[in-house]
Image (spheres, helix red, strand yellow):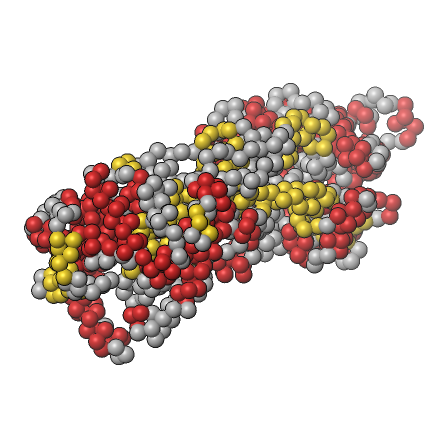
Amino acid sequence: MTTGYRVAPYTVPVQRRAAGLLHRDSVLRRLDWSLLLSVLALCAIGAVLVWSATRQAAVQTGDDPQAYLKRHVLNAVIGLVLGVVASVFDYRMLRAYAPVLYLLSLAGLVAVLSPLGSTVNGSHSWIVLPAGFSVQPSELAKVALVVGMSMLLAEKRDAEDEPRDVDVVLALAFASVPLALVMLQPDLGTALVICALVLGLVAVSGAPIRWVVGLVLSAVLVAVVAAQTGMLKDYQLDRFRAFFDPTADPKGAGFNVRQAQIAIGSGGVDGQGLFQGQQTQGEFVPAQQTDFIFTVAGEELGFIGAAIVVGLIGLVLWRAGRIAMQADDLFGRLVATGILCWFAFQSFQNIGMTLGIMPVTGVPLPFVSYGGSSMFAGLIAVGLLQNVHMRRYA
Amino acid sequence: MSERSRLRLVVVQVLVLSLLATLLGRLWYLQVLASESYQAAATENGTREIITPAARGMILDSRGRPLARNRTALVVSISRTAMLRQPDGGRELVAKVARVIGEPVDAVWEKTRLCGAEGARPAPRCFNGSPYQPIPLTDEANTQMALQIMERREDFPGVTAELTAVREYPQPLGANAAHELGYLGPVTDEELAERNQPGARPAGRRLETVLQATDLIGRTGLERQYDADLRGRPGVKVLAVDSQGGVSGVVSQTDPVPGNYLVTTIDADVQAEAETQLKAAILRARLTGDINKGYATRLKADSGAVVVLDVHTGGIVAMASYPTYDPNIWVGGISTKDYRQISSKRNHYPNQSRAFQGEFAPASTFKAVTLPAAVRAGYSLDGSYDCPSAYSIGGSPKRNYESQAYGVISMLRAIQVSCDTVFYKFAYETWLRMGGLDAKKNAKDPFTDMAKAFGLGRRTGLDLPGEADGRIADRAWKRAYWKATKDFYCAKAKTGYPEVARTDPRRAAYLLQLSRENCVDGYAYRGGDAANFAIGQGDTTTTPLQMARVYAAVANGGTLVTPHIGRAVMTPEGELVRRIAPKPAGTVPVSGSTLSWLRHALRTVTESGTGYGPFARAQFPLDKLPVATKTGTGEVYGKQTTSWFASYAPANDPQYAVVMMVSQGGTGSGISGPSVAELYKTLFGITGSRVELSKARPPGGHPTVKLPAVRRDGTVVLP
């Protein structure tokens, strides 16, 4: 990076900005519209799917059938606001705030492990707030981790562009603390997402190849040791076993997998129709509005609908990759790469488990699954992508 | 930024692309290629079958008295889905129910766990029905409990108290017949899988053969043999449900079809009397000293059996075994204690029927088989034969067990006094003529061949599971037995019996001698074996039922009937479904003149032979109702003798064959004989010296022919 900083659009006087919304350098022109529209489309589809997944149960219990729909939309609106905030100031300034973000996320993760946290589905991952809200700090920690690691790996050095060993060590040490805290919850899904993200960041940072190879090998090693020594909880192992043989325990660990596949498989090409899915409306798929939301798309919208969801995610990932590629500096590229890896792996993990090609671990599908923290983190990340995009030297 | 970073970013993007491609590929497979099977699974998921069990058909005695029926019990059950709806998984609900029915909370909770789940009772006592089937908590609720539950439905969501049919064995007149009736048990997973295989299901009649997981299935006896007739067809209601069990509609409904009635040949009066008389014989034996021990020790009389057979049809009018048990202990699942009781050696295995599962040496009752064999071998019925106290076989004397020396006597006398030595001579001489030890393997032995012709050594075809074969210890058997045991005996022939020698050197020497012989030429069919065979001793065994069939064949003129208990299957409306009248197994190869000679001889056994005592003591009017009998006293190594009494009556127009056997019960005439005489009094309505066939049980002195009348409501017109 030899060129100097280009003056960012937001530094132009306010009165000029208002006058030139369609000006070449205007915010609206510089936004990555494909990215934004795909994300909004995913949020909208998510809202409908969440609605479909929850209305039947609400009718039975006499609750408002649209309660989840409304909350999902509210989450998306709050998330969009947060995303705008994440995009308005120059991302390079983020470096200054990275330590603060990092410490905040660590505080959140520690709080979750304290008596403040609540256990849902075997993971101690939530902080329940008044008025029915709850926060899942591990979601927001991903944002802090992406920014922090990118900062460490892209630290401006005099002679060389690539991070030295010491930088990599520092970055890994930096990542290991939240990773360990997430593992303690235990939230295996998020931990895996963090691993994927760390690996992607180290690779794209240009660090010596031995680090990339080493990380891959140690990940394999840890997986084997964990399975052998019983570091994993029984239910986690059961889920993995159920992955390899879903029929082994149809009422237990394999139940989700089996029901999810029945739901998706019975959708066929064009689906059973919105609100018409037998599996969905009969509430056969557990955690359907959150981790198994994709099954609603599969059953009610069929292959066409499910493929559109996958396509939209692909669009988001393509734009994230493009933004990383075109970023002006290594920090920007790494931020975008981290988000790319995060979204990509989490989406694959989530959809893959509903399709029976990945073990069941509780991670939400970005923008589609119901859940505030996940939605906020995702939209903040999109804000960061836009931030990097808008401030590139074009 | 370096080129390396750029390249790696490209690699990352390619990886991401491949992940997406994987998802789409899998999605294509699930939703397009394999969609049909998942759609089927979804349909199955969304419906639930609720099974209404069919009332099991009754088992009736020959005159319509129920031997097995259903009693209605108030069953309190709980819906599992209702439990799951409770915030605490139903714990509090179960506790409330437990308080009402007065059982410990934990015990009731245990019952609600499905088989295999944590805290469930071990199979088969756990609940293995579908999760949508209400789980029965008790079948002993009373009306007050039921009202408590049904009147406060809001406090007991998903709990019901309903009248349900439970099996009951009422034992009319005390007729227990436990071994014949059998019992019900829960169906096992294997049976379910086997019976419900697509191939095992006739098209269009799906539910008739399909077993449900909650079904009870006949495990032994008539309950098992006629299970398909008795079970009926369960009603099935197919409901559309969600995952919580919430019902959204009825898809289809078929009403249960009650099971058919089984009418048996058993007459409850005779069955009760047979059981009483068998028990009397056992008790008599236990008060009697063992003649072989100089009356110093009492007879053990560990077990016994009695069979009353219709000589013409093979219908079993009564069949009893001692010891027995109350068949009702099986209802609702047998307790561990009860099960141990009826299957323990200490109690002489009350769960086994000596009548058709017990194998015993038939002793002299077997002469009814070996006499025709001797005739075949060329011995004249008009000849005179020497009856010494012992007969020498290969240089060693074989003594006359049941009688002393009678000198030269007629064949008739030989039967009357049951002279063993005469039969030794017949068998040994025949054996010598056949070549003795060198006889060909396939040589035709008239004695063993005759036994086979009388249906011995194989099952009679009785319509009860678990019948024993008995054994004909002929040449082939000896050779097979030697092959199976020679290694053991040859080893013992080398080592001897030091453990026995310590306490009983004489016995050890005897055993060693035996082992040596068995090792070297145990396969040989010796003269002694042939002689033993002729008097029903040695390794030859029969069941009491087989012997009853032999005497029925003698009585009816040579037809080998097929014994059976089932007589007819009727619908609960009283319509005949089918009669059960198994064809005879064949005819015995004995000439009519020999048979009539034998019938005459057996009649004189009662009048002036070994069968005289019991009937004389019972002041039985033999002049009005002649009886043909043959006694037997079987020697068993290491045990007291087996008491046999085989008979049929009336001797001039045979109707029933009665055989009684008491293991370790002394002599035939002393122990079994008196009981058989008493039994005939019931069969022919005898009081004092009067024979009143109208008072006979069954009436008329012959088995009931008419089928019981069933009223429209399914109840039976009782005699």
Q: Quadrant of the N terminus of chain B?
A: top right
Whether residue A338 sits left or right of residue A75 in the image: it is left
Residue A9 position (above or below residue B670): above
Q: Is residue B68 visible?
A: yes
From the viewer's side, name the closer residue of A121 and A160: A121
From the viewer's side, name the closer residue of B338 and B666: B666
Whether residue B174 sits left or right of residue B585 in the image: it is right
Query: Residue A328: x percent and y percent?
Result: 70, 35
Residue B19 position (above or below residue B667): above
Query: Residue B399: x percent and y percent?
Result: 18, 64
Residue A119 position (above or below residue B503): above
Residue at coordinates 60% horizontally, 42% vertically from top-left? B70
From the viewer's side, name the closer residue of B87 and B575: B575
- In the image, farthest residue toward the right: A15
From the viewer's side, name the closer residue of A350 and B90: B90
Residue at coordinates 21% horizontally, 76% vertically from top-left? B506
Q: Quadrant of residue A189?
A: top right
Query: Residue B558: x percent and y percent?
Result: 27, 39
- The mark tally for this picture is 0
Query: Residue B238: x percent and y percent?
Result: 65, 30
Q: Is residue B85 visible?
A: no
Whether residue B175 sits left or right of residue B422 in the image: it is right
Residue at coordinates 83% horizontally, 21% vertically from top-left? A22
Q: Quadrant of the C terminus of chain B?
A: top right
- In the image, farthest residue toward the bottom: B502
Residue at coordinates 69% horizontally, 32% vertically from top-left? B241
